[in-house]
Amino acid sequence: MKPKYIIAFDQGTTSTRTILFNEAGKIVAVAQKELTQHYPKSGWVEHDPIQIYKDQKATFEEVLLTANISEEEIAAIGITNQRETTVVWDKETGIPIYNAIVWLDSRTKSYCESLKGKGYEDYVRNATGLVLDAYFSASKLHWILNNVPGAKEKAAAGQLLFGTIDTWLIYKFTAGKRHVTDVTNASRTMLYNCKDHAWDSRLLDIFNIPKVMMPKVQVSSSNFGSINHGATSIPIYGVAGDQQAALFGHGGTAPGIAKNTYGTGCFMLLHTGQEFISSKNGLLTTVACSLPSQGAQYALEGSIFVGGAAIQWLRDQLQIINTAQDTEAICNRIPPLEDVYVVPAFAGLGAPYWDAEAKGAMYGLTLDTGKNEIIKATVEALAFQTKDVLTAMQEDGNMKLSKLQVDGGASNNGYLMQFQADMLDVPVDKPEMIEVTALGAALLAGLKAGVWTENDLITLRKTEQTYLPNMTSEMRQQKYLGWQQAIKRTRTI
Ligand code: ADP
């Protein structure tokens, strides 16, 4: 019997899932477990690595059972995961010496500030494409080695291993045989030199991390080892961090293609091809998944702190909508030229303004402004913020966006997607298969397994709806100018 299914492990911040895809790239079965969040102190966020492994295994078993298929029918497994989250374990016992420190955890903020004070910022940016921040793995790993008794000595003696979640899962599932990661995950550790394609010895020195702890780095679509299940050995042929997997799942394999995930926050990636481009606007440079026929590929990455969260604010704080879904019909009722603006700078202004002190604001209110105008302006703010980041990315990359691929909860808002296409003046493409992150991991694995060819990738991804720009350029300029003025008045620097 020829194996025909592909499994994706999708290990996220709040849940662990296993998804079964068929040859047509369609989902056959899904199993999911919620992940316990541990908050030992203010600003600290931890996960239990053993729970992560057990949940991944349990959801895998559950999917096999519900789909009623046997192991022999699975061609390969792909893994996608929350990025940057850091695990350290004992090489002999395979037991973690501390909980996983989650990407959101800010305990190493002051340590990172002290490194900035020593002038390492430029080196970090040039070597890794990242900003020197507590968000990435390097300072978390440094913290574990310096705070778990005896860890530093054991690490130096080669008795401890480091991994992001992909590495940890592969290590456990291969019974300790493989200590590996992929380039996209490596590029988020702040220890990987994205130009030389190797762990950076100067950064390892700065963070005081013995090189023996570091996993071997492979391209995202390659052989990461095998999982023995029953009498069958199933290969892991794909690994990528969640955002890069999503870009790949959207078919983002060529320069100029961008994806935006409209969730609580918005996460944007613009594929920039084979050149490592440093941002002048505070955006990140990151490694993208490459096709087997390509060399190393890069992307610019930017995020918006408050995306769908602004819609939640309308619902929970202002209480002027019942559900997020209500916003679409309301937006469609308000005349297009209404010039109310809401700047949802509830957590400061991010890229490309980087103004942490800024606060949210509303502009253009008159006596006839009602709640519906405020709702519409809040929805439109997601599109304006996206345009700000994408404009900065295009400037950095010296390239023109060809289309925007979208996913995430708020991409279900047809008004917002049309307005986004109008503001960007490029088509906005929403896929049928909304699980693009898991699909990306499955595609990486399926390519290596020979289930799909590079050409299949184009036909596998089906568009549900394309929103074509349909606004005069005068109107676009007028609306965007209004937004830029609102931003100008909101900024504190
Ligand atoms: P996350 O993965 O960050 O939890 P989701 O992708 O599930 O986010 O999207 C949820 C977010 O999208 C919420 O903030 C919600 O307010 C927003 N949202 C969901 N549906 C709509 C809609 N139809 N219009 C506008 N916003 C929406």
Image: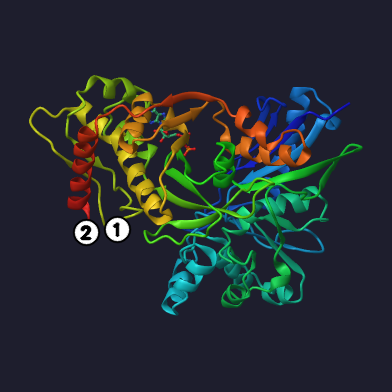
Question: Residue 85's spot in the image, x, y percent?
Answer: 59, 55
Numbered tag placed on residue 492 in the rendering: 2
Looking at the image, residue 176 lies above or below residue 15:
below
Across and down, in percent, residue 415 comes to 34, 25
The residue lying at 18 percent from left, 35 percent from top is: 340
Q: Residue at x 75, y 44 (%)?
A: 237
Percent of width and height locating residue 200: 62, 71
Disc 1 residue type (three-letter): Asp
Q: Height in image: 139 above or below 285?
A: below
Q: Position of residue 52 (x, y in %)?
A: 67, 46
Which of these two is toward me, 64 or 122?
122
Place residue 311 in its image quadrant. Answer: top left
**Label 1 belongs to which residue?**
355
The residue sitting at 31% across, 32% down in the picture is 422
**Looking at the picture, does residue 189 appear above or below residue 485?**
below
For the residue marked with disc 2, what is the amino acid?
Answer: Thr
- Residue 141, numbered circle: none
- The one nearer the camera, 421 or 27, is 421
Specify whether 196 is left or right of 485: right
Tell me which label, 2 or 1, sits earlier in the chain: 1
Would you say residue 431 is visible in this rendering?
yes
For mark 2, give the secondary structure: loop
> Relative to residue 141, is residue 217 drawn left or right?
right
Q: Are marks 2 and 1 in contact (CB under 8 Å)?
A: yes
Q: Name, please, the residue furthest toward the left.
A: 367
Q: Is residue 262 visible?
A: no
Is the N terminus in the top left, top right, bottom left or bottom right quadrant? top right
Query: Where does the C terminus fall, quadrant-wise?
Result: bottom left
The quadrant of the rendered image in which ligand 1 is seen is top left
